[in-house]
Every structure is written in C-alpha cells, then in structure tokens.
Amino acid sequence: MTRDIDWDALASRLRDAMGERVLRPGGDSFATAVALWSAHPTHRPEIIARVESTADVRYVLESVPGDVPIAVRGGGHDWVGRARAEGGVTLDLSQLRGVRIDKTARTAMVQGGARLEDVIDAAAEHGLVAAVGTVNEVGFTGLALGGGYGPYLGILGLAADTIISAEVVLADGSIVTASDAENADLLWALRGGGGNFGVVTSLEISLEEVPAMLAGTVVFPTADMSEVLTSLDRVLPTFPDQLAVSPAIGSGPDGHAALLVTLHWSGEADEGAGWVRAIERLGTPLASTIGPATPQQALHALDGVFPSGRHYTLRTASLTGLTPEVIEVLADGERRRTSPLSAINIHHFHGAATRISADHSAWALREPHLMVEIIAATADTEGHDEQIAWADRILDALRPLALPASYPNLLPPGDTARAAATYDSSISHLDAVKRDRDPTGRFTGIPIGLPHPHQQTNQGDHP
C-alpha cells in the first residue's frame, strides 16, 4: 500500500533540478504529455517528469519514495497504457531521441526515447538498417526490450537480439553499463525481458547493410482469403532470410474488407523480383504496390492506418502455421468485424531470429512461428466494448490451436502464463537478475512470468 504523498511538495522538489519539465494534472502541458497512442486506458499519473538526461532519471528515482509507482514512457505506444503510472510518477523519455551511427562498426547508439523513424532515418543515411518494427511512432527501446518483431527478423533477428550494450539506471539511482564485459547477466535479461530491471536511457545496437530493397502490399479480395493463406502456408518454410511477408485482414485502400499481404525484401533486387511474382500469384490480386523502396518508405507504409488518439485493445497468439482450422477462425473473425478500423496482422518469425542461442538472450521462443496481432480499434468509446468482445472471440478460438507462448509486448499484465512460456527455462535466471538488480520490485514492464508481484511500471511499446 502506497502511503499518503504530498504530490505538490514532491513536484516542487523535482522542479528544483528540472524546472517546468515537471508536470502536474490540470494544465495544457500535462494533457499533452499524458496522451498516448491508445486513448482507451484511463489511469493517470500524479506527476510527469520530462527527463533530458541520465542524471535527470537518477534524480527522479532518488527523490521519489520507493513505494510510489514509477512508469517509463518512451514512444507511448503500449496499448495497455503502462507508460502512465496510476497514482505515481511517469518518467517521460520522449525528449531523448538522439541516434548516433558508427558506420565502420555498423552500430548505433540510441537514446531511450528515440522512435523507430529516428533510428531508421539515421541508419539509412549510411546505407544501413536496424531491426525495427512496422509503425514509425513506436519507441525503439521499449520495442527492443520486449522482443521486437518486424520486417528484418530474417536478417537481424528480434530487435532485442541486436542489443550490444545498455546504459541503465537502477532502482537505487546507480548508473550501470550492461555489456558482455560488465553486468553481462543484466544485458542477457534486457534482451527480451522488458523494462523490468531499471530505466534504460540508451542502447547500443547492431545494424546491417542491405544492397537493395523491395516493399509494398498485394491486395486480395476476402473471397480469396482461404486460397491465398493456404498457399502461403505451404511456401513459408521455403522463405530465405531476406524475405518478410505479413498478411493482414482489414480494410483495403478503398475502405472495403480485404486481405493485404505486405512484402519486404532486403537483398539483391533480381532475386527479390521472383518472390514478388510468387506472392502476387497466390491469388487474384486487386492491386499490388510492391516496388523499389528505401528503409524510410517501408517503415512509413502504415502511416495513418493506426493513428494516435483512437481507442485500441490488442490480443495476441502465436501459431505454428496457417492450418485450415486457423484460416477458418480468421475468416470468421473477418465476417464478424463491425469496425472498419479493426484488423488482424500476422508476423512471420523465421531466419536469423530462430538461430539465436540461449546464452545470448532471455527470449526462448525460437522455433519458426506466426505471431497474430488482433487489433480492436474504434474512433472513440462508442462500440469499443463490442470490438473487444470481437477480439476476445478470435483469441478464444485460436487458443486450442496456438503455442503456449505469446508475444509479451502485446500481453496484458495478468497474462503471466503465456509470457512465461516465451522465456521457458530462462525464467529462473530472469528471476535471479530481477532480485539482484531490483530487490524491492520497483520496476515492472511487460509480463514475463516472474512468480512475485511488482508495482505497475513499464518501458514497453507496441511493435
């Protein structure tokens, strides 16, 4: 139980070092700072501290009593709203968006508030790419700490797999570096274990050089859904590392229901062109936009599709393939979808992501699979409960067909069993790192299946 706090006095103390970057409810600045990608969560912090340095983070952690909930905001793209500390303090890292590239080493230093577009833009200036997700506004650090699915899974692995080192402010305010040379166990835990161990103020990540890129979407009518997904399931095991294909069920460019198969090729253009033709021949396309693209163009392909300010609730399941039973569940979901803003996205986990050793990362789910992302979306509160029920119905139908594990970055706080299955035998090691670095349980990010409860804190983002 958190004791009574004099919030005005605490805010005044924080302002001694941070000035007007410490916000309390009531002003326009607070309303802007508290807004997240999804407008659905309603909880609210008592203080938002907009930090501009690692020293600011340390000052806040040393000033705020240990029993006050702490949350961390990077990109603010988590659907649960975990960047808001209900009755507590939100550390807002959104001003820390710097990215520094070392072209020779093919690495980037990424500050804790940088968004995917910041990272991809900086890397692209040097002919390099990073393991980003699919929505430009997502915070890179939250994405990477919790895994990080995206179009570069095949050549780079999860975003978590590309973490080389991290600067972390621990619960007591101490600042440490996690790398292979020091605090290696903490680095291992951060590669997929979420914001459960401290505040990550910067990451060093590996990058990759890509000779050419093809990207775009093939639009099929929903009448072709069964045929296309069945054919796609047959060819998925043959995909090279350079090829990423993500089918989605939602509204097409004309507003009508459609199956949209997004293709992302990172390699020699001639070889990629053959795969483009193969995907287009899966059915009878209504349209195809696949062509040469830059990393920036590929990342911005979904701009405006899932904008901030709508109401979003997400569900997820991981599958071994698109079996007839799975396809029927997805087709039934499309028939029952009543909001044109809702969608079902499918991400293919393959290639380099499946070849990462257990001593590199806490993330144990390394078999090829499909991560299904069910997005219930409405413009406002009207009809949102109906869309949540729609998403729950699909998830309930997929559960008997799914793997025990699911993507922790998309799970709600109470779904610890499926999160634990993602880490499998790594759980005991994660628990040991947690107890050593955060013995009082000050930090809780995404669920990872740890057996003891912690306060509500987060440094996580939607992929």
Image (spheres, rainbow, N blue to C red):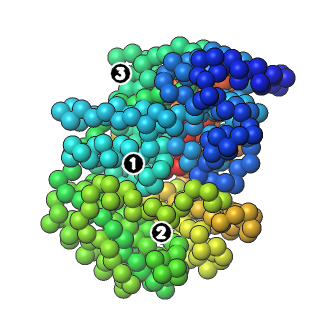
Element carrying mark 3? loop
To which quarter of the image does residue 427 belong? top right
Q: Amino acid at mark 1?
A: Glu
Q: Which residue is mark 3?
A: 180
Q: Which residue is mark 1?
A: 117
> Helix, strand or loop at disc 2?
strand
Between 145 and 57, which is closer to the camera in this rendering? 57
- CA gap between label 2 and label 1 equals 22 Å
Name the residue nearer the viewer: 259 or 29: 29
- Distance, label 3 to label 1, CA atoms, is 28 Å
Above-or-below relation of 291 to 170: below
Against 264, residue 261 (above or below) is below
Residue in front for this viewpoint, 199 or 36: 36
Q: Position of residue 382 (x, y in %)?
A: 74, 67
Give the foreground label among 2 and 1: 1
Nearest to N terminus: mark 3 or mark 1? 1
- Give left or right: position of 109 versus 97: left
The local secondary structure at tag 1 comes to helix
Q: Residues within 10 Å of mark 1 (few under 14, many from 20)?
A: many
